[in-house]
Image (cartoon, rainbow, N blue to C red):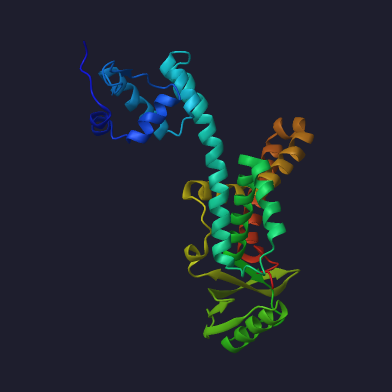
Amino acid sequence: MKNQMNINRVEQETGVSKQNIRFYEKEGLIHPRRNPLNAYREYTEDDIRAIKMIKMLRMLDMPLGDVKKILDGTESIAAAADSQQKRLKEKAVQLSAAIHFCDELKKQNPDKDELDVEECLARMEAQQAGGFFSQWIEDYRKVAKEEHEKIFTFIPDTAVTNSREFTAALLEYADKNKLDIVITKECMYPEFTLDGVEYQAERNYMSVRGIPVASVRCTMMHPELYETGIGQPRRKLLRRLYYAVPVAIVFLVLIGLILGRASWVFESREGWVVVIGMLLTAAVGFYRFGIFFYNESGKRGK
């Protein structure tokens, strides 16, 4: 006969409380025999193994119903693990959305009487309904907003030829957009805070119909301090997507134009010269766009 153990010994062997051991018996997961003389439960090595198996599977948050099927032999461990993995992935999406929402509430720090509960519930329900895809869309919007505010440009009304004119241009821009600005360093590369966020500005010139036009480019000095709580792998992917979309659109348009005259393009040397010239022109155009026009609408006002 196999060694018999009482429930106190089993608790020590497995690290599972006596209350849980009795609960597992009540649910039909284990079946200890009873001593006919005193009706005490007596556990064998097989019971110990079963309890440890239950403990392991419950640490995976596996439902008791699936655990029982494994112990009964009516479902394989692999099949049960596959079902549980799907449940955990769905739960992970919900938890990720909840974490992001908590992060937003912390940053907004609303008063309980001022919080728009209806709007919050609507957003949370939309996140739950949309699941994985909606969370990626929401994260993309956050990353796009971050990138938009990390670097923005505007065209001042004056030529900005000295530090005083530069300061005046920044103050005028902030006033127009109803933003709080504090100039912390006055020069041709001024530093300032906009709504408490530190920026540095530089002046660039571009030619419009032969006339030089000043463009002010403002760059956030410590962008890492203002990033939302999105994991770095996902953030990197979304940033690449954010910058790749406009480039992809332009090149698709160019390819469409080229294919429209495919026979001439691909059958002559001049055609290849035209293709390469168009691609180079597009690349230069994007470079100039990045320097002079990127986020030209500027940082949003209040």
**Residue nearest the viewer, comparing 189 with 36:** 36
Q: Position of residue 163 (x, y in %)?
A: 57, 86
Question: Who's the residue at 45% across and 21% down the image?
Answer: 68
**Where does the N terminus fall, quadrant-wise?**
top left
Give how far across and how far down residue 171 sits, in percent: 64, 84
Q: Is residue 238 visible?
A: no
Q: Residue at x 68, y 83 (%)?
A: 172
Q: Measuring from the top left, give residue 46's x and y in whole percent.
A: 29, 17
Observer able to see residue 46 = yes
Residue at 26 percent across and 18 percent down: it is 44
**Looking at the image, which is closer to me, 228 or 259?**
228
Residue that protrudes farthest toward the front in the picture: 37
Q: Residue furthest top?
A: 1
Residue 107 is left or right of residue 178, and the answer is: left
User: Where in the figure is residue 130, as x and y percent of width and height?
Assistant: 67, 42
Above-or-below relation of 204 to 93: below
Which is nearer the eye, 35 or 135? 35
